[in-house]
Image (cartoon, helix red, strand yellow):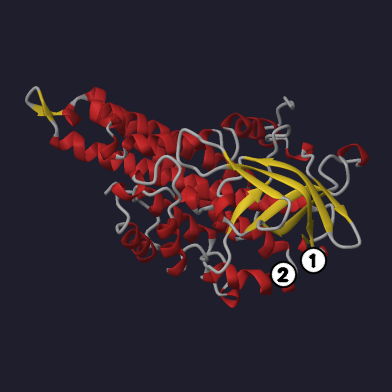
């Protein structure tokens, strides 16, 4: 196993996650492609309490820190599994936990923790808005009977396998607010409500993503989380948690690739010596390992700041940037080490290679991370 250094306080937690994941080997994941959902895997994670880890104990969850949750996601990914099938429940419910009413938390969180309800869908991105979240057009209009929702979301992963959605919608039109981040509200809604249509989007990896259409969807007044018009601020801290957990998945991917490559580099003999002795093979792996260790340190710095309630936007974004680049470098080096076998499905390298590529553009494009750092951290002029 690849030595990761400093953080050993989660060894028991990591061992428990790995033991569960070992029951779902590569054959299981290959059998789900191109569009199957790992129902059995998600059910077992739920029964073991891993997906409820961030829910406080008083609501039936594990009450762990984000640093511990990051270790859970890392181990799932390092095992060869695809945590994207279920990772949203780890961070989406944070909006409800931090900004919902006590009545909302009492109603939803115990059921989510027990697996009676799945909260896997995050309705934010829209076809005409993309990363410019303040430009969303999905409208929530307050009526005597509740909130009337009309609009469209895209890249809403796992919506077909979720009971609930955290939805961001405009309650005041964009051209009627003085500040573009105002007039946006956040709701929790039942995805089985009339007027909702969910269409799958086939992709290069098995990510179960969709577009969701809302046509006069009526939800109760109490579906509003927090104050009307404050939703954009509410989701920002959840986005930091998302970036930290995604970084952790990429770190797990990098470990998977490097462990595969090191094992093969030691055992595969060509021209009288192991291929790992060749600098053309060894140096890219060593460089990817250095990138991995750097990403790991930034990931835990971000998680620790989050857990202390400190500002962590820069650290969360840097962790995601560094980790996604480390996993991609490790994946490339792993394929080069294996040669043609790196493209063979039975090795699971090409599957994980496709899965980890996503995180250079999601949940935020790495170029936008660089723009954020340049403009908001370093004080350079705004480019957008």
Element under disc 2: helix
Q: Position of residue 14 (x, y in %)?
A: 37, 60
Q: Does residue 378 appear anywhere in the picture?
A: yes
What residue is rendered at 48% in x and 55% in y? 70
Q: Position of residue 178 (x, y in %)?
A: 91, 40
Which of the 4 image quarters holds residue 42?
bottom left
Assign the C terminus to one quadrant of the image. top right
Residue 40 or residue 61, whichever sits in front? 40
Circle 1 crowding by C-alpha within 10 Å: few under 14, some 14–19, many from 20: some
What residue is rendered at 62% in x and 60% in y? 93
Q: Is residue 164 above or below residue 360?
A: below
Which of the 4 image quarters holds residue 176?
top right
Disc 2 vs disc 1: Cβ atoms closer than 8 Å?
Answer: yes
Q: Which residue is mark 1?
A: 222
Residue lying farthest to the left in this orientation: 272
Q: Which residue is mark 2?
A: 104
Q: Could you tell which of marks 2 and 1 lies nearer the N-terminus? A: 2
Q: Mark number for residue 207?
A: none
**22 relative to 40 in the view: left or right:** left
Element under disc 1: helix
What residue is rendered at 64% in x and 34% in y? 373
**384 relative to 1 in the view: left or right:** right
Q: CA distance from mark 2 to mark 1?
A: 8 Å
Q: Position of residue 220 (x, y in %)?
A: 80, 63
Q: Does residue 232 appear anywhere in the picture?
A: no
Residue lying farthest to the front in this orientation: 194
Residue 190 or residue 63, whichever sits in front? 190
């Amino acid at each position: 196993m690849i030595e990761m250094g400093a953080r050993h306080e989660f060894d028991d937690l990591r061992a428990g996650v790995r033991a569960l994941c070992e029951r779902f080997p590569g054959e299981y994941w290959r059998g789900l492609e191109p569009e199957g959902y790992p129902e059995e895997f998600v059910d077992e994670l739920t029964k073991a309490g891993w997906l409820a880890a961030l829910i406080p104990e008083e609501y039936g969850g594990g009450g762990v820190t984000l640093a511990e949750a990051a270790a859970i996601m890392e181990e799932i990914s390092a095992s060869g599994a695809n945590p994207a099938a279920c990772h949203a429940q780890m961070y989406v419910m944070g909006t409800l936990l931090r900004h919902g009413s006590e009545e909302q938390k009492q109603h939803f969180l115990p059921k989510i923790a027990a697996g009676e309800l799945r909260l896997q869908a995050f309705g934010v991105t829209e076809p005409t808005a993309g990363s410019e979240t303040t430009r969303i057009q999905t409208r929530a209009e307050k009526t005597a009977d509740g909130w009337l929702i009309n609009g469209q979301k895209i890249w809403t992963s796992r919506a077909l396998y979720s009971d609930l959605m955290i939805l961001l919608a405009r309650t005041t039109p964009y051209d009627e607010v003085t500040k573009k981040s105002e007039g946006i509200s956040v709701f929790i809604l039942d995805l089985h409500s009339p007027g909702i249509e969910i269409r799958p989007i086939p992709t290069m990896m098995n990510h179960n993503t969709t577009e969701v259409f809302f046509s006069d969807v009526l939800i109760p007044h109490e579906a509003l989380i927090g104050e009307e018009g404050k939703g954009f601020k509410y989701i920002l801290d959840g986005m930091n948690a998302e970036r930290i957990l995604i970084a952790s998945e990429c770190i797990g991917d990098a470990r998977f690739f490097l462990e595969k490559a090191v094992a093969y580099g030691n055992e595969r003999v060509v021209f009288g010596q192991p291929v790992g002795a060749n600098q053309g093979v060894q140096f890219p792996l060593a460089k990817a390992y250095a990138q991995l260790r750097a990403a790991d340190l930034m990931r835990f710095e971000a998680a620790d700041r989050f857990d202390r309630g400190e500002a962590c936007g820069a650290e969360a974004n840097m962790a995601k940037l560094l980790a996604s680049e480390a996993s991609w470098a490790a994946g490339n080096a792993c394929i080069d080490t294996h040669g043609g076998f790196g493209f063979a499905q039975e090795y699971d390298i090409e599957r994980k290679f496709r899965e980890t590529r996503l995180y250079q553009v999601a949940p935020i494009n790495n170029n936008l991370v660089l723009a954020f750092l340049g403009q908001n951290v370093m004080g350079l002029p705004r480019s957008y």
